[in-house]
Amino acid sequence: MRILALDVGDKTIGVAVCDELKLTAQGVEVVRRTSAARDFARLNELITQYEVGLVVIGLPKNMNGTIGPRGELVKDFANDLVQAVPNVEIKFWDERLSTVAAQKALIAADVSRAKRRQVIDKMAAVFILQGYLDSLSRG
């Protein structure tokens, strides 16, 4: 079973998946949010396609470790995902600075500003998932 990671935003959901050995994360796509039903249907398709058993959702925390309004919205999203796709386990992963790290990596790769906007959420999901995978190898 593979692991899928999500970077949940208001307008998009970045999606990444790991290889079968759970060593590396690869970006899959950016889901443009339209409605809860469509969003969850697309995520369910990806979960089925990649034979996912665990979904890691980036949980935005404040720099002091507390969970603010954005984090509460992500938790609500996760609760709704569990209802829509009950056969998958959900875990949260601290995503502080994942978008910043993704942005820096894209700038270092000389990706244009317009292209960065299109892929930043997918890259953030990759950073979230790779962090989670790295924690498994240390544990």
Image (tube, rainbow, N blue to C red):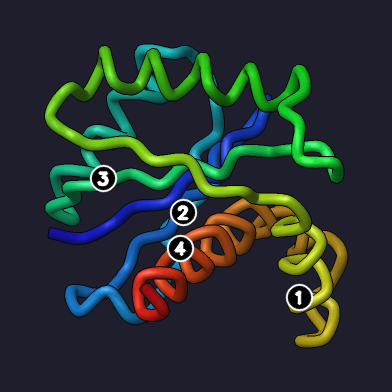
User: At label 4, which amino acid type do we have?
Assistant: Tyr
Task: Point out the tag, 1 or 4, that comes first from the N-terminus.
Answer: 1
Q: Residue 117: percent from the left, percent from the top?
A: 77, 54
Task: Point out the tag, 4 or 2, that comes first from the N-terminus.
Answer: 2
CB contact under 8 Å: marks 3 and 1: no
Q: Residue 31: percent from the left, percent from the top?
A: 49, 39
Q: Residue 46: percent from the left, percent from the top?
A: 26, 45
Task: Point out the tag, 4 or 3, that comes first from the N-terminus.
Answer: 3
- In this orientation, which residue lies closer to the viewer: 95 or 123? 95
The residue carrying pointer 2 sits among few (fewer than 14), some (14 to 19) or many (20 or more) residues within 10 Å by Cα, namely some
Residue wearing tag 1: 106
Residue wearing tag 3: 46
Q: Nearer the viewer, mark 4 or mark 3?
A: 4
Task: Point out the tag, 3 or 1, that comes first from the N-terminus.
Answer: 3
Label 2 to label 3, Cα distance in Å?
10 Å
CB contact under 8 Å: marks 2 and 3: yes
Disc 2 on helix, strand or loop? strand
Disc 3 on helix, strand or loop? helix
CB contact under 8 Å: marks 4 and 2: no
Q: Which label belongs to residue 29?
A: 2
Q: Residue 40: percent from the left, percent from the top?
A: 34, 23
